[in-house]
Structure formats: C-alpha cells, structure tokens
Amino acid sequence: MNVVVTGATSFLGTPLTERFLKDGDKVFAVVRPGSRNMDRIRKLEERYKERLVPVPIKLEDTESIKDLIKEECHVWVHLGWDGAGSGNRTQQDIQQKNVGDSLCSLKGAASLGCRRFLFTGSQAEYGIRDSLMAENDVCQPVSEYGKAKTDFYSEATKYVAAHPESSMEYLHSRIFSVYGPGDHPWSLVESCKKTFQAGERLELGDCTQMWNFLYRDDCAEALFLLAKTPGTIGFLGHNGEDGIYNVAAPEEETRPLREYVETMFRLCGKRGGFTYGVRPPNAEGQINLIPSTEKLRKITGFRPGFSFEEGFQRLLLMP
C-alpha cells in the first residue's frame, strides 16, 4: 500500500510509520517544515530508503498535497494535531484551528484517491465519567481539546456522506492513556520512573480514579490494524456505521491509578517514595478511564504485546 501519515515525527507517529514500513508499505511522512524532530524520520530513511518519502508541508496546506505526491494512495492516517500538551488543551482558538486543518487533510486524502482515512481522536471526547466508556455512548467533552476532536468527527462524517463518489471510508479512533519511549517528561509514568530511579520522593494527587495504560508500540499496532484490516467497519455515509474505535489496553488492565504507581515503585526497587493527596485535583474534575475495547478486539483481533509491568520494565532498560 501507499500510506500517508501526518504527525509522522510524533510520539505515536514514528513507531506507526515504522510499522507500515516493516510491512512493506510505502509511506509518505507528512512533517512540519523545519520540524525539530526530523532526525526521527532521517533514521528511518537510512533503513528503508526509497519506501519512506518525507513530505514537508503545513497541515493547513494539505488540501493541495496532490501537488507534492504524484502517486495514488490507499490509506491516510491523521495524527497531526497542534496543542495536544496539557497547557494548550484549554485554548479554544488553537483546538478549533486543528479542526479546520484536519478537514484540509481529509480533502487532501480524497484527492489522492485514499479509500480509508483514520483519525486519531481521544478519550477526552467522552468527558468526565465514572463508568464504562463504549463507542456508542453520548460524548460530553469538557476540555476544548475534547470538544475539537468531537467537532472533527461531526464535520468529517458530514463531508464523507456528502461525497459518496470518493468511496472513502472514515475511521475515528479514541485513544486512551499511552506511555512509552518519547513520552512527555511530565507524564505520570515518566515522572515516576525518573523520581524513583533517583531515589527521590514524588508528590501526587489522590490517584483514586480508575485508569488504563497502553504501551506506545501496542497503540501503534492497534492503529496499524485499523488502517489495514480488510472489512474494518467505518463510516461510509450510506451504511449508518459510526466507524468509532476505542484504542486502549484490555479491560483487565483497568485498575485504580494507585496500583499503577505502586507497581512502578516496586519495579524501581522501592527507592525514594511518594505521597498521595498533595497535588490539587484537576480543575475539570476527576477523570476515570474505563474503556470498552471489545469492538477493536472483535474487528481487528488486536491484543497488546505487553502488560503494563512488561512495558514499564522495557522503559527501565532504556537510557
């Protein structure tokens, strides 16, 4: 296949790009001109040569990407999204610009003849919940980030329904909590790893909410399967399917956040320590992550390769 990946230098974009390359696909890696993470693509170029083609273009210009890619493409995976860090998730202007930029990419995909467009949404679309999160639940997002992801789903399905001649299938993944190499240094997993390895003490919130962690490479595998599995059910406009898939670890990995903290503390040799209840709760309210992954598993056969303990132990072995 010829595959387009936006956000190819990102935390998830790089391992997903490599997964396609390992499967023999040709990947057009859309990167921001002057990206400080271009070294990630250059390293892959050394190994995969002509099957990896960097495409330097801004997301807002991707509607005209046919001027740069002269071949028909089959799948477009859209990970490009500015302001995903916690500081920008409340900024309405930044998040809504992403909606418009992503629509440009959707139109660009149609111009290249793509038959499948896979968008990376978020658990933030569900809002504040304390029960199982299933794909057909009503979304009540609280953050501007979650609202924008939901808005794009609405706009994208309208576009696909209005252009049946393109025969493009729209899939909308909702990614939950992912950890692994290259994660933000302020994430909980990275903070625990760094603090406990140094024998220092970490101040935390109550950590009483339910949580679900998925290793980065397993998340990339799930997205790969959604992009390539024949018969994956997506929104085509004429069949009424919603095309939404939760991407998370299986239900048995969902547990109180404290259990994750205490597992990391143990795996780090019980060095340092931690104190619960010091950090204030999230201003938006306590977020629980209780994903249903039955649909993903049923359609693609996805099962993660690593439990949380195995994934964290891999992190400990990395520099």
Image: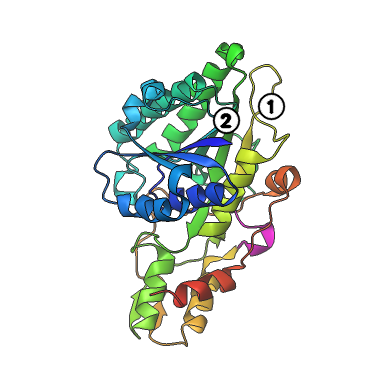
Q: CB of mark 1 within 8 Å of CB of mark 2?
A: no
Find the residue positioned furthest to the front. 50
Q: Amino acid at mark 2?
A: His
Mark 2: secondary structure: loop
The region drawn magenta spans: 248-254
Pointer 1: what residue? 241
The number of numbered badges drawn on the structure is 2
Establish if 266 lies above or below 319: below
Quick one: label 1 or label 2, which is nearer the N terminus?
2
Nearer the observer, 235 or 86: 235
Q: Amino acid at mark 1?
A: Glu
Res. 126 in view: no
**In which quadrant will I find the C terminus?**
bottom left
* Image coords of residue 86 (percent x, y): 34, 50
Residue under the point 71% across and 45% down: 300
Q: Which is in the foreground here, disc 1 or disc 2?
A: 2
Nearer the observer, 11 or 31: 31
